[in-house]
Amino acid sequence: MLTAVLLLVGGLLLAAPGRAGAAAAPLLSRGKPATSSSVEDSTFGPEKAVDGDPATRWASAEGSDPQWIRVDLGATATVSRVRLNWEAAYAKAYRIEVSADGAAWTRLATETAGNGGTDDWTALSGKGRYVRVHGTARGTPYGYSLYELEVYGTTDGGTPPPGGAFTVVAAGDIAAQCTASSSSCAHPKTAALAQRIDPKFYLTMGDNQYDDALLSDFRAYYDKTWGAFKARTRPVPGNHETYDPAGPLAGYKSYFGAIAYPQGKPYYSFDEGNWHFVALDSNSFDDAAQIQWLKDDLARTTKGCVAAYFHHPLYSSGGHGNDPVSKPVWQILYGAGADLVLNGHDHHYERFAPQDPAGRATAAGIVEIVGGMGGAEPYPIETVQPNSQKRISGPYGVLKLDLTDTTYTWQYVGTDGQVKDSGPTYTCH
């Protein structure tokens, strides 16, 4: 790097590159959740900059400033070194910043005349959980691209950040009765995007197949796209799965088999890392057996983070609006300290601030995300609900959820590979 600016923050001199004492600090960022302001396409996601593979990279959208990439270290750390390995699309000017909460940022260093290659900032001193590289001027006409973003330091107590990081892709309202031969057919595009992300597994939030979820339609449409990763999919049914003339959920059950009925019912649970996932059939929330099973299941889990997913959202700003059928289930989940609820039904993307079943904002509440943009025709936003933080209708896409043993965050990624929205990073209750 050509020019480094020294910063004085809170009476502490934060220096540009030097070597003293940095070599012994452990690498904290490898494999941790990473988010970014944009991606060139889904093959260049922010996670590629922290995967330890020098051949993979994050790349932002081309031609616009500013852009940023951040990594969640999973615990408060004293950051002593940041090493950046730029691709040909480098930053001429950027800041390295640290934050305790992912909202308020403190500069550790500033570059004003970068020339690409490797920038190794080895005498930093700042404390926080999140580290961000904030590019303000591109060095080329393209975007920003990093092969590696490495953050070194020590976490509070001298212990490494929690592990168990993994990625999940989720979407609802997926397979319209069309194929890739039609340029307007969206589910082949969302499937290709989901497959490129290559998560640990996939979640679907119902209305997997339109219009009546016949087995023949599953085979003709869904199976040709999202069916490519059927074995790694954990589905739930929507209302369209109940329309099958052969019987409610008949085609759904025949197509997915034990994948959708691992415990002999259309509701089930499973664990990954420190997360407990609960898959529910919101068509039958009046079924006493499902409600009792849910209570018992939540009472048994020892995992620190809980996510539930089902079709009908309790709160939605879309055409279907709020669905009170889900309120009793929310009350059970809220009482058990659940963290996250994923829904479909309304064909748009929306995220809500943490709230209780009555819709009151509270830090102890559940974060709800509506992700019904898997391929069905979009619905307009109609009545914006309290605590709704972001709404997008029109661009198809998927939810990319990044989870650790104690935290979760996500991005809504469009089929064009662009990140349309990034959620905050929350700590599990």
Image (cartoon, rainbow, N blue to C red):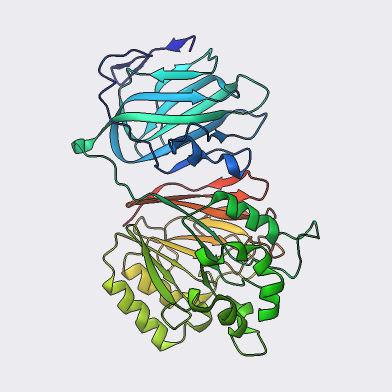
- Using the image as rendered, state which of residue 381 and residue 130 is in the foreground: 130
420 vs 291, left or right, is right
- The single residue placed furthest to the top in the displayed view is 2
Residue 364 visible, this angle = yes
Instruction: Identify whether 300 is placed above or below 391.
Output: below
Q: Residue placed at 51% from the left, 30% from the top?
A: 147
Residue 365 in the image, given as x and y percentages of width and height: 38, 60
Residue 283 in the image, given as x and y percentages of width and height: 53, 81
Asked which quadrant contains residue 304, the reply is: bottom left
Tag count in the figure? 0
- Using the image as rendered, state which of residue 252 and residue 327 is in the foreground: 252
Instruction: Identify whether 199 is placed above or below 293.
Output: above
Q: Residue placed at 66% from the left, 26% from the top?
A: 142
Q: Residue placed at 57% from the left, 22% from the top?
A: 90
Residue 7 in the image, given as x and y percentages of width and height: 38, 15
Report the quarter where the C terminus lies: bottom left
Instruction: Identify whether 9 is placed above or below 69.
Output: above
409 vs 248, left or right, is left
64 vs 79, left or right, is right
- The single residue placed furthest to the left in the displayed view is 157
Residue 211 visible, this angle = no
- The single residue placed furthest to the bottom in the displayed view is 246
Instruction: Identify whether 47 is placed above or below 150.
Output: below
Residue 314 in the image, given as x and y percentages of width and height: 50, 70
